[in-house]
Image (cartoon, rainbow, N blue to C red):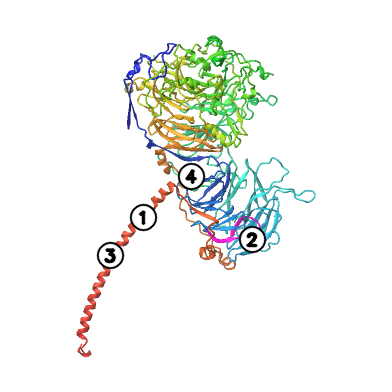
Amino acid sequence: MKKFRKVLDGLTTSSPVNPGGSPACGSAAGTPSTAPTPRELEIQETLMSEHFQICKTVRHGVPYQPTALAFDPVQKILAIGSRSGGVRLLGRPGVDCHCQHESGAAVLQLQFLINEGALVTACADDTLHLWNLRQRRPAILHSLKFSRERITFCHLPFQSKWLYVGTERGNTHIVNIESFILSGYVIMWNKAIELMPEHPRNQMKHLLIGFESGTIVMWDLRAKRTDFRIHYDEAIHSVSWHHEGRQFMCSHSDGSLSMWNLRNTAKPLQVTFPHGKTQRDGRKESCKPILKVEYKTSRNSEAFVVFSGGLSYDKAGRRPTLTIMHGKAITVLEMDYPIVDFLVLCDTPYLNEVQEPYAVVVLLEKDFVVVDLTQSNFPIFENPYPMDIHESPVTCTAYFADCPPDIIPVLYSIGAKHKKTGYSHKEWPVSGGTWAVGSQTYPEIIITGHADGSIKFWDATAITLQMLYKLKTSKVFEKPKSGDVGRSAELVEEDPYAVQMISWCPQSRIFCVVGISAHVILYRFSKHDANTTITSLEVRLQCEMEDVISPSDTENTPYFSDPSGHSPQPQPPSPRSNTPDSVRDSIPCLKVKDRMIRMPPGYQAELVVQLLWVDGEPPQQITSLDLNSAYGLLALGNCNGLAVVDYLQKTILLCMSTLELYGSADPFQRLTRSPRKNRQSTSDFCMRGLSNFHSDSKKRIRTSYQSLTELSDNQVSLDLERSKSPTSDHVNGHCTSPTSQPCLTGRARVPGGPEGPRLARRGPGRPPFRKAQSAACMEVSLPVSSLTEESRENSFSRSRSSSVSSIDRETKEAVTTLQFAESYGRKSDTLPTPCLWVGTSLGLVLIIPMSIPTDEQERQEDPVTVAPAGTVLMLKSSVLRFGFLDCGGALINSPYEVWRDQHAPYDSDRPRKRKLVNFSPSSFQEASGDGHLAVVCSERQAKVFFMPSQACLYVHNITESSFVLRADVVSVCNSVCLACFCANGHIMTLSLPSLRPLLDVSYLPLTDMRIARTFCFTNGGQALYLCSPTEIQRITYSQEMCDNLQEMLGELFTPIETPEAQNRGFLKGFFGGNAQTFDREELFGEAAAGKASRSLAQHIPGQGGMEGMKAAAGGVVGELARARIALDERGQRLGELEERTALMMTSADTFSKHAHELMLKCKDKKWYQF
């Protein structure tokens, strides 16, 4: 434990005064203040570097771009391979493991060693890998790299140690699974057929080799020759055996199925076109290829034939299908996505027994479905895994750890009423492995926003993920009429309701959603349905009459315009019918439903705030949002300014441009001018929709306040104006050295002054706002088809100046972050009051104090006063996050309102009154003195200020070559730290308040904007991001959680006895021969087949992984201990045996002596003398 002491005796001295005569704000020295200042600040920091470690925990969602499927019928474990080299292993709920090949090569095929706890993967780089599944984190035991031939297919018979590997050259090689070494036995293409093998199948001592051109070869393994060849006109895609081994079925490229009997291979026994109709000329209509077929028998019914594809070409637009033929009945199941592979699950692992199929596992491109074969209507099983995360593309995420314990059951009970029905009532068939909830669990919730405007709440407790509740924000708006496509269609081509940002207060259950059309929807939670109307507020947040330019463009313009020149009240809307784009003004993009609406239990919309068109220009996207349930306020900002809404009184309190918020305290002394003459066309501001944003297309979201490239050299750089001291790398004389030393000296950098000249407030006496639709449009996601992957990646990691936006060319300033808090708006304040902290893209922080009535009745009637105080703090680059600590270093949470159901039946005994919980720093005054600490993090820098003196205590430059994408003040190990994720892939943690670096790991290079938009930290040392369009990756940066991860993960392998084979009977065994005695060791072993060529394949021993090594070490230690005990016992027994042997030898010697003496005594005596 380390103590940090900060003597603040010099804080009461006067600071240097700037030419304007105003004292400095945010410097190391402050103006005299009547507020008591602590003479000594003691902070005990407990976090050390040993408390942090980066580790992946679990991955959720269907694997992206799946390629292969396998199932262990005894262990009941499922494996899915992907194009990126990942392998997903699934069992019962909670048993979910993701493995990754280091090469990243696509997985071509998967083969389980049934009931052995091992898996073989064949990858596109022509390498075979053997995975050990007998540990919680599987690891590679062996690898075999083919150098001269490409792998096309693998087959591993049940209870065999010999793996058949087919190659592109037409050869079939044999691999010993135990040693993972090639056998010298090879089936050469010129001995079998001069074509490529695709699908080998094993049948006792014969190997059936199918060739894609339509030729089938039966190879005798013992005689090393071909038994027969079958030539067919159509290409073969798959082969499936009948369990008796006398017939097999093939699927072909013309949509036909052919049945063959081994007794007569001259022609097929039967040829059928399941979906091909006979035309008038007698020919079958052309059909699509049947890519795979499985032929399974049943003891109590007719055989099942399951195949994919085979539909006729004449029906365009039909979805992919899976066909189930059961006797004469044909059932076609349409799928939402193309079928990658499927498997028929059977009761027995023995291929020579009646199969008794009970389910079909279907792997789709973006889904995973299991069909129940035991019921005639073939229903699907309800999937316990979260495979529908991507049902609509994910556009934003939020992660909440340690939620109130009652919120998850409530959300689940509401969401369960809207679940789909018609699922199979049987138990989920993939039920392998074991999993138990760990001891260290707490309620966790993940919220995902989607392109179609839907919101999903997920229960993320422990390492599971289960959907709780789904909310559709599009239901708030009217659907566009067929005759009128609507303004939203003009602005957002595909996704006008796409969710851009979310804000949630779990304690009050108030939920806010920011849409891509620059609208904000506020929801309240209720357990009862309600009939209500949705209030709509329209905000005219646009620099319309006073645009901002650099001082060089005009000289005689006053600094600030008349306060009455810019009214915060929205102007009356212009007529909406037949409004051309050039004069479109004060109209919204989306129309809010203005009638009475019945809302079901759950989250119910109460208020919609929308930004309006101004003089033909659409509103800019909303870049920041915060709500506070205790204050009843909502704040939103974009590149034009800030708006504060009172959602209790349904009024707008503040609507000002960013420049107006400063008043005379603007550090850059920017000027104003008349409206711009040349306006950009509206098409430049249109949003193209986010559905393709999370796909393979090379698109980027360009936010209005962030540019991902450097500014040109001829731009007026604000950095030069900020850091004029050549002796230190700081902002206006404030130290920013990496050593994070306190700032003891400084100079004036922000002119202070009176409060902002404009106070925008709407009380009950003001004219009411219309309940109508609001306009907003998020800025466009531009297609960059010519952008290469390399340049795209470099664009994220370039150095960025503090002027991070293309709009900085006009010195505009975006509001990038907002937070309500109990703080000090002025240096002279003695008590904390409700404040709004505003961070901008130029690295400036404004503190706006507010006056909120405390009485509940007065709060509903009296207006809330919002008065910008001119307080400005400065950092490098765009501000990202605020955090607040008390003088003891503990985190100060925002005040909140305790949830109450407004639509519950009225109870006179329990009146519904507002109950507020306030974490004001004043509650810590007795122990820690007055004031609190404010943590401010920007894209390049972090600072800790002492409030109310605004003294900068600590500064740390986070990065110079990159920039921070996400920063959060989080609780870890009963302490607080600042967690940052940078564009160069580094994850960092800094201690608070000293900003001491604790962790800096290069974890994930940012190659996709998806990661930047979805990465988020939470308490408990956890984080998540969208690693692919369909998967969420959760990670931890806590050493404690890494240590407990083994306990949290499920066991993939459980000891199960292999089921015994059925008794074949005397007659079958006598007449059919005993093929089970066929020993492949005498054919494939080194003694019989010799060694394979070393140049053909290279054996690579696996690392095994640290977890495997630990597990193996633990197992070896246990075995050694048991062996030592056994040896001791054996030694003891051997010692006892040796003693008994010695006694027997002594006794034998004594007996020998006595016998010899007796012989000498009696040798001369006659017989009659005895």
Distance (Cα) linking label 3 and label 4: 51 Å
Amino acid identity at mark 1: Leu
Residue 43: x and y in percent read: 34, 27
- Please tell me which of labels 4 and 1 falls first in the chain: 4
Kindly indicate whether the residue at mark 2 contacts the one at mark 4 (C-beta within 8 angstroms).
Answer: no
Amino acid identity at mark 4: Val
Residue 188 visible, this angle:
yes
62 relative to 1136, above or below: above
Residue on which disc 3 sits: 1136
Residue on which disc 2 sits: 190
Disc 3 element = helix
- Please tell me which of labels 3 and 4 falls first in the chain: 4
Residue 470: x and y in percent read: 55, 32
Residue depth check, mark 3 versus mark 1: number of the one nearer the observer: 1
Distance (Cα) linking label 2 and label 1: 52 Å
Q: Residues within 10 Å of mark 3 (few under 14, many from 20)?
A: few
Residue on which disc 1 sits: 1120
Residue on which disc 4 sits: 95
Disc 4 element = loop
Residue drawn 32% across the image and 19% down it: 9
